[in-house]
Amino acid sequence: MSFDEEWSAARATATAHVTMRLNQAPADPGGGGGGGDLELNQDHIGAIGSEAYKLHTRLQTDGKHAATATAEAAGALTKEAFASGAALLKANSVWESQVKTLVAACANISNGLNYSLSSHAKDEQQLQADFSASAIDRYLK
């Protein structure tokens, strides 16, 4: 299963869980903040997205700092007819692949959170506009 498929499945599961929690939340006649309220703390989401971006940036450089030395060591071992040279080269190849996967995952997390914040802000604006329009319409009738 690719990361995108896993991410989509995780989002669908989380959405279903939140929806189920909201549907089961008891009605709050006082209008206070009950336990079923969905809350999006933009500062926390933004901080997580920022950390994911920082990790993405560092992994791109720090994840490759041993590549040259590893390739040289693998070449030297292979030249001296050690089988471990080929094994070291393969281990380095797997390492590079895993670093690329982590870099892509961090980018997806950062971009996904940025999209969520932007989308939430647009939804809030639309809800506020719809509410304002319905209140004006009610008073005009």
Image (cartoon, grey):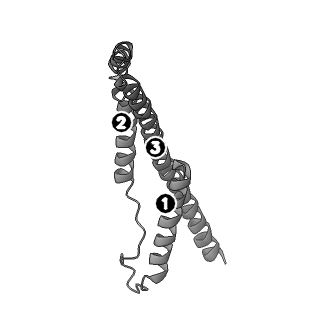
Please tell me whether residue 76 is drawn above or below residue 125 in the rendered image: above
Viewer-side label of 2, 1: 1
Instruction: Provide the residue designation for mark 2.
Output: 54
Furthest residue toward front: 81
Q: Are marks 1 and 3 in contact (CB under 8 Å)?
A: no
Please tell me whether residue 132 is drawn above or below residue 2 in the rendered image: below
The location of residue 122, given as percent across then percent down, is 55, 54
Q: Are marks 2 and 1 in contact (CB under 8 Å)?
A: no
What residue is rendered at 47% in x and 65% in y?
14
What residue is rendered at 53% in x and 64% in y?
12
Instruction: Choose the circle earlier in sequence order: 2 or 3.
Output: 2
Viewer-side label of 2, 3: 3
Viewer-proximal residue among 115 and 60? 60
In the picture, the quarter occupied by the C terminus is: bottom right
The kind of secondary structure element at disc 3 is helix
Please tell me whether residue 140 is drawn above or below residue 48 in the rendered image: below
CA–CA distance between discs 1 and 3?
Answer: 14 Å
Instruction: Choose the circle earlier in sequence order: 2 or 1.
Output: 1
Instruction: Provide the residue designation for mark 1.
Output: 10
